[in-house]
Image (cartoon, grey):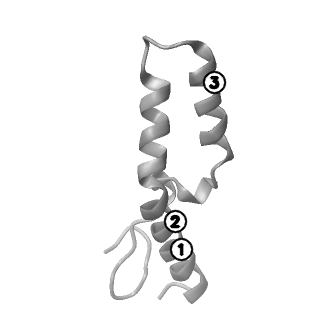
Amino acid sequence: MAKKSSIEKNNRRKRMSKNAAPKQAKLKAIIARQDQADGRALAATLKLAEMPRNSSATRIRNRCELTGRPRST
């Protein structure tokens, strides 16, 4: 059984990721566009870097629904 704090931390990351996903997608689209001036892409990169790291979807850990064990069973 995983610690309650680990499970709660992962749940908080899921909530943060869900809330920040539209903003991150918008910023990443601005960065990926090639036909714009560099200033706008640089500003979007800086805004993306200012966002909390735990709001990224890659920070979410796959855990077992029953026990909270990492990497499921």
Q: Is mark 1 on a helix, strand or loop?
A: helix
Q: Where does the image place residue 30, in percent across and percent down from the top left? A: 47, 28
Q: What element carries label 3?
A: helix
Quarter of the image holding residue 3? Answer: bottom right
Q: Where does the image place residue 24, in percent across and percent down from the top left? A: 48, 45
First reached walking from the N terminus: tag 1 or tag 3: 1
First reached walking from the N terminus: tag 2 or tag 3: 2
What is the number of the mark on residue 12? 1
Residue at position x 49%, y 56% from top? Answer: 20
| Crowd band around label 2 with a 10 angstrom C-alpha radius: few (<14), some (14–19), many (20+) | some
Residue at position x 58%, y 23% from top? Answer: 40
Amino acid found under the numbered disc labelled 3 = Leu
Quarter of the image holding residue 69? Answer: bottom left
Q: Name the residue under label 2.
A: 16
Which quadrant is the C terminus positioned in?
bottom left
Q: How far apart are marks 2 and 1 (CA)?
A: 6 Å
Please state if 15 lies on the left or on the right of 9 as rendered.
Answer: left
Amino acid found under the numbered disc labelled 1 = Arg
Residue at position x 33%, y 88% from top? Answer: 66
Q: Mark 3 points at which residue?
A: 42
